[in-house]
Amino acid sequence: MNCAMKTVTKCMKCSAALTRRKIVIGRGSIPAKILFIGEAPGRTEDLFGEPFVGRSGRLLESMLLKAGIVDKYYITNCLRCRPTDSADQNREPTGDEVLACMPNVLHMASRVHPEIVVFIGKVAESYYKKHFPITASILHPSFVLRKGGENSPWFEHNVSILRRVADAVNHTESLFTGSRWPVTVAHSDVHDVPEEISF
Ligand code: SF4
């Protein structure tokens, strides 16, 4: 464990610190071509200290496998501690919490040094899009789970985006010339996503 990680394991900079069991930093390769940024640890992640190890994580793994992304990625979250409500249920991070944890995430991103950053869900996209030049966004797997999991059309929606990400990192030069790859891959590049969608 390096110095930065020692610092973060004692972090009390936001309210999520009060209810966490384990800090969830991330997992994967460093450096890596693809950096995934999710929302926050849930109950299972809080227990095991790893991101995306619960049902949502298993669904995400299925998407990645289907898209041909099996390694060369690192995955982390906007928050490293689990935010909970008064009934000990998972909740969406507040803006203050995301901003408090942002230096940790950006420090990790500098170590991972990705070619493309993929946001998992709207929280990561809304806070981090301006920080990275080449990005893509997928629907949060917990949303896809609620809509039917692998049987949901949103599963294939995410796989379509992830295939384009895989294709992009296999043609790195074009990522930077812009000759065949847009700088940002939006949901609307693959499907029409209704405005009212909750992901
Ligand atoms: S979520 Fe981030 S900022 Fe908040 S206590 Fe945990 S490590 Fe610190």
Image (cartoon, rainbow, N blue to C red):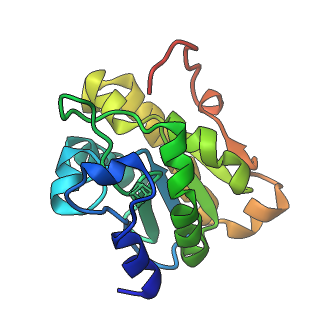
Query: In front: 68, or 94?
Result: 94
Query: In front: 87, or 139?
Result: 87
Looking at the image, can residue 64 be seen?
yes
Looking at the image, can residue 34 be seen?
no
Residue 142 vertical placement versus 171 (above, below): above
In the picture provided, is 121 more to the left or to the right than 130? left
In the picture provided, is 40 more to the left or to the right than 116? left
Query: In front: 162, or 139?
Result: 139
Q: Position of residue 174 (x, y in %)?
A: 76, 62
| Residue 131: quarter of image | bottom right
Residue at 61% over, 38% down: 126
In the picture provided, is 18 more to the left or to the right than 13? left
| Residue 69: quarter of image | bottom left
In this view, the residue farthest toward the bottom is: 2
Residue 4 vertical placement versus 163 (above, below): below
Q: Position of residue 96 (x, y in %)?
A: 53, 43
Q: Position of residue 90 (x, y in %)?
A: 27, 36
| Image quarter (top left, top right, bottom left or bottom right) of the N terminus | bottom left
In the picture provided, is 40 more to the left or to the right than 181? left
Residue at 74% over, 56% down: 133
Residue 27 vertical placement versus 147 (above, below): below
Q: Position of residue 152 (x, y in %)?
A: 32, 24
| Image quarter (top left, top right, bottom left or bottom right) of the C terminus | top left
Q: How many marks?
A: 0
Q: Quadrant of ligand 1?
A: bottom left
